[in-house]
Structures are given as C-alpha cells and as structure tokens.
Amino acid sequence: MTRFELDMRPVGHITADAIGSPGQRVFYIQAWQDDRPQPVTVIVEKIQLQSLAIGVEKRIAELELEKPELSQALADYDPELMRITPPVDPLFRSGEIGLGYDYEADLMVVMVKEIVAEDTEIGDSSVVRFWCTRTQIRRMARWSQEVVSRGRPICAQCGQPMDAGGHFCPKKNGHKN
C-alpha cells in the first residue's frame, strides 16, 4: 500500500461505531469534511476506542481547568447522527491512535496511524489526522462509550466477555458459566 498522510482540518463531523453482532463486531472511526464527497473511515480495535474515549474526557477536563475562559465542550448527541454511514470503505486498520490539542486553533486532533507488517520499514505507514472541535470529539467519546457497552456481557468471575451461551470460565476451573 502506498504511504500517505491525510489531514482533515477541520472535520465537519466525526463519529465511531461498530458493525456486526457482539463478539464479531468491527469498530470504525469515520469523519466527513465539507469539501470531500465521501467520508474517511478507518478500522480501530475496541480497546483503542475505549482508551480514546477515556483520554478525550481526561484531556477536556484538564483543558477546562487550565483555560476556564474556553466555552464548555458539549456532550449531548443525537444517536441517529452518530451512526456511521455508507460507504464503509476503510482506508486502513489502525495500529496506533494519538490525541493532541492545538491551543491557538482550539482544535483537538485524533491521529490514527496504520498498522504495518513487522518487516516494513519504520515510517512506511499511512496516517490520518482528524482535527475536531472539543464538542465534536466529546460527543464522539460519549457515543463511543455507548457503542462499546452494547457488546457481550462481562463475566463477574474472570472479567472476560461471555457469549450468549456463557463461556468456559478459568476462575471456575473451566466450567461453563
């Protein structure tokens, strides 16, 4: 795959969602930019989405203490507007996700770097940067928490996800829970 860098500065809208049944879901981040006819979509792991949501909330709380003059980042969202839309044609699968903030522009950035094979040279991965307002990214973070929570229930014994019929719990010596 050809290496590229894409800066979506700023995005018109950003969201995350999952497609598939619990245990088989694929997670995505998708953003639109006013001058692009198609959304930009990348595949992410569930844990990356969870970590991003936590990081966003933490960073916004820090910014509110650091810069009290900033307007408050809203957290409300319309579920219908937060669902990803076709075409779901991901550019790549994420290997790393980072979060940053531009103080001058008052924009947060989600940097998504492509996962690459072990034998690939360092620096030969594609990168997408989604530049968002604090409200856009907070809405995505809150929606992401909702998306992740719709997954499989967690076993109270071992903390692992359970399938519809339960699972073989190591804490119960392999007996089905």
Image: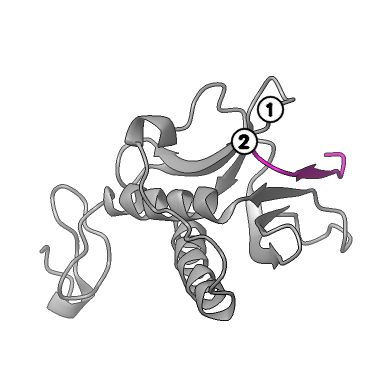
Secondary structure found at label 2 = loop
Tell me if residue 114 can be seen.
no
Asked if labels 1 and 2 touch by Cβ distance under 8 angstroms, the answer is yes
Residue 4 position within the rendered picture, expressed as x and y whole percent measured from the top left: 85, 43
User: Is residue 58 placed above or below 91 in the rendered structure?
Assistant: below
State which quadrant residue 7 falls in.
Answer: top right
Instruction: Please state which of residues 113 and 82 is positioned toward the viewer in this rendering.
Output: 82
In the figure, is residue 156 to the left or right of 36?
left
Q: Where residue 86 is drawn, which disc sits there?
A: none
User: Is residue 123 placed above or below 133 in the rendered structure?
Assistant: below
Q: Quadrant of the N terminus?
A: top right
In the figure, is residue 80 to the left or right of 130?
left
State which quadrant residue 37 falls in.
Answer: top right
Q: In this figure, which residue is indicated by the disc labeled 2?
A: 12
Instruction: Please state which of residues 72 and 102 is positioned toward the viewer in this rendering.
Output: 72
Graded by Cα atoms within 10 Å as few (under 14), some (14 to 19) or many (20 or more), the crowding at tag 2 reads some
Name which residue type carries label 2: Gly
Q: Which residues are magenta?
A: 1-11
Q: Quadrant of the C terminus?
A: bottom left
| Distance CA(mark 2)–CA(mark 1) | 6 Å
Residue 96 position within the rendered picture, expressed as x and y whole percent measured from the top left: 66, 61
Task: Please identify the residue farthest to the front as the structure is shown.
Answer: 69
The residue sitting at 63% across, 29% down in the picture is 39
Q: Where residue 34 is drawn, which disc sits there?
A: 1
Name which residue type carries label 1: Asp
The residue sitting at 55% across, 27% down in the picture is 88
Nearest to N terminus: mark 2 or mark 1: 2
Tell me if residue 10 can be seen.
yes
- The magenta stretch spans residue 65: no
State which quadrant residue 22 falls in.
Answer: top left
Secondary structure found at label 1 = loop
Residue 140 position within the rendered picture, expressed as x and y whole percent measured from the top left: 47, 49
